[in-house]
Structure formats: C-alpha cells, structure tokens
Image (cartoon, grey):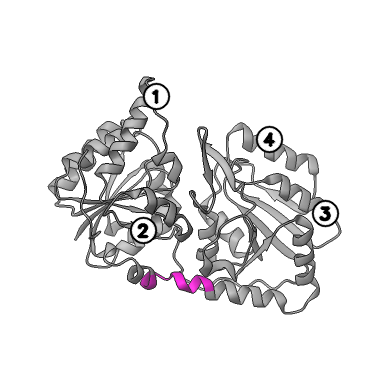
Amino acid sequence: MNVGIQEMEHFEGVYPVIRLFDTGRNRLFLFVNKTVYHRLLDLFGEDANRFEWIIQQENESTHSFCRRIGRTVQENQVSLLYLNTVSKHHIFYARMLAKLKGVESVLTVHDVNCLFHEKFSLEPRRFARYLGKKWLTRCISAFNTVSETVKPALAALAGKGKRVFTVPGAVYEKPGRFVPVGQGLEIVIPGSLDSKRRDYEQVFRLHEMTAGLPLNFTLLGGGKEDDAIAIRARCRSIGSGRLRWFDTGIVDQHIFDEELDRAHFLWIPSVVDTRICGDIPEIYGITKSSGNIFDIIKHAKPFIYPETLCVQHELRSAGISYNSLENLVYELKLILETPGLYRKWATEAERASRLFTIEKVRTKQYPLFEGRTGTSAASF
C-alpha cells in the first residue's frame, strides 16, 4: 500500500505513526515542513532514506502545499492519507480531501472541543475557520485520538459510521533505564514552558515544601513566549541548586531523551481544566490528550499526576496520583525511606510500557496499518 502521512508541528508524535506504518509492505510519503523534517532525520537516522519526503518550503502557503499533497497522492495512487496535526487552515485540507475521490483518510484530533465546537462568526477569518473545521470533519473517513480516555468524547461527535482509532503518541521500543535512588530522587517535568498546560505553581510550592529532602526538580522544556520567560525568571529568583531549567526556545531531542532516561519520576502537573484554543474549554484526559503520557511510555518511567487527571487504566499502576501536595510529600518521603520501594515502581512502569509495543498497537488498531480504515468519507 502507498500511505501518506502529514505532520507540521508534533515531530515526536508522528514518529510512532511512521514506525507503525513502516511494516515493510507500505511505501510511505511524508508531508512535513522543514522543522519537522530535520527533527525526524535526527530520530530516524539512515532509516529516513526509506521514505519519500515532500517538504513545505519556507514561504510556501498551506493552500499551495495542500495542492502538492493532493497531486502526490493522485500521481502515486496513495490509498490512505493520515493527517496527524491540522491546527489551522482547515479549509484547505478539507478542499484537498473533497477532490481525492476513493482515498481513505484519518485525522488525529488533539483537542476535541476546539475542532467540533468552533463558534460561528461572520468575521471573515473566524468564518473561514468555522467552515473549514465543519467541512474537514465531514470529508474525513475516520478519526484518531492518541489517548483511550479521549475516545468517548471524540466518538460522540465523530459522526455515524466513522471509526475512531487510538494510535498512541509513543511506542515502547527498548527497556527503560533503571536509575538507583542513591542520594535522592530526580523528578522531571517535561513539556514546553506553558502555564496553560502545566501548573508550575505546584512545582515551586513542592520544591519549597521539600527543602532539606534529597529531591531535585527539572523543568524539561523550552519556550520563547512571555509565559516561558516569566517561568524561567521565577526559577532564577528561587536560586536553588535543586531546581534546573533550560534557557532555550527548544530543548534538543537527544538532551530531552537523556534527561528523561536519568529521571526517577516524570511529573505531570496538568492544568486539567484549560482554555488553549481561544476561549473554548478543554479537559485534559477527557477532551484533550497530554503528550507527557507518551514520554512515560517511551522511557518506561513511573510518573506523578493529580488525581483529577484521567489516565488510561493500562498506566495507572505505574503512577502516583495525589489530591494535595502534602499527600505527595508523604509518598515521596516513603520512597526515600523504604529500600527497594522505588524498584517496584520502576518495574511496574516497565510492565505498563510493554503494553505499547509496535506489534501490540498494530494488532489492536487493525486494519489501519494495512492502509485501510474500514469506513468511507462523506462529502460536504
């Protein structure tokens, strides 16, 4: 089968999609921009030469790029087009799909409410966005969400006869690195510095509450926005050797992976009820998925999360949920004071991650990776 895969933002999220479709029987056409292309080259190395790359140029519009995608699909008889991230210019993708007769398509939905509950407006840009989202959801053959916990909300809006797949945002490919507790615990908070996504006040408060304990915290993410600058300024004002951060727009992938490998716990201090897509509300774990969940799978690490965050059941046994920071301090002290307790957490994380191997995901999502969705697109 010839399969096309599009991604313009989340290189780390499309990596497992490519790996899953790379069965040896599929010829893959990858539609990406230059930033995603270079990050994927780092991840795939020489294996990247096996794929056909169609790269959006620096000054090329989405309209022009979608036309190139459409031509490539038609000229190479691509049978399945997988759109992994469409966060803007929906109308151009919808128009492209409407012209691709007989081609099945899948759209990964990262924010359910943002896609399906765009507010109507006669203001030209907002009207185009409203129309584009409506059109795209009708043209698409099937949907995908990276989290099982988001599937019910997406399925309720997907439309009659449209399947909802759950291709995770990471796959387990190698055993996680076990790090002995030794002199203390390394707690890493992965993800871009964004207070709409992560509650850094919790991090700073826990850091203060555990003064004197061998607990180190790392904010593992970059950012250039005012929010990220303010978070880094707060870190500097604290001036603690137990608190680390990265003063950069983007953390290089190899550094990101190294930091997660040396971590004992990944902490997800999610802002569970949030508004990132304008004023449209989303609930992490219910209508919006957290990419940090997939850092857990990839690196096979135990994690920490607020009890209000909905986490899929396969992973819960590897996570410490907390309803207060005092409760979390108690759990961390217990691990520090109990020999062998951390190894039990690490073992459970390894067991949970093994449920997300390439083979198991392919089997669960059959027949997607054979280039079929089992549904057909509707027209607007």
Near-viewer residue (360 or 114): 114
**Residue drawn at 56 percent across, 58 percent down:** 310
Quarter holding residue 340? bottom right
Residue underneath mark 2: 17
Q: CA distance from mark 1 to mark 4?
A: 34 Å
Magenta stretch: helix, strand or loop mostly: helix
* Residue kind at label 3, given as amino acid type: Met
Residue 304 x %, y %: 65, 61
Are the two marked residues, 1 and 3, in contact with CB atoms closer than 8 angstroms?
A: no
Q: Is residue 183 above or below residue 205?
A: below
Q: Which mark is residue 230?
A: 4
Question: In 3D space, how far apart are the residues under numbered discs 4 and 3 (Cα atoms)?
Answer: 22 Å
| Furthest-right residue in this view | 212
The amino acid type found where label 4 is placed reads Ala
Kind of residue at disc 1? Ser
Which residue, given by chain and number where applicable, does mark 1 sit on?
121
The first of marks 2 and 1 along the sequence is: 2
Circle 4 Cα neighbour tier, 10 Å, few/some/many (<14 / 14–19 / ≥20): some
Q: Provide residue 159's location: percent of width, then percent of height.
A: 31, 49
Residue at image location 65% in from the left, 73% down from the top: 345
Q: Earlier in the sequence, mark 3 or mark 2?
A: 2
Q: How many marks?
A: 4
* Viewer-nearest of discs 3 and 2: 3
Magenta stretch, residue numbers: 352-360
Q: Quadrant of the N terminus?
A: bottom left
Q: Position of residue 326 (x, y in %)?
A: 79, 58
Regarding mark 1 in the picture, which secondary structure is present there? loop
Q: CA distance from mark 3 to mark 2?
A: 41 Å
Q: Which residue is mark 3?
A: 209
Q: Is residue 356 magenta?
A: yes
Mark positioned earlier in the residue sequence (1 or 4): 1
- Image spot of residue 95 (x, y percent): 23, 36
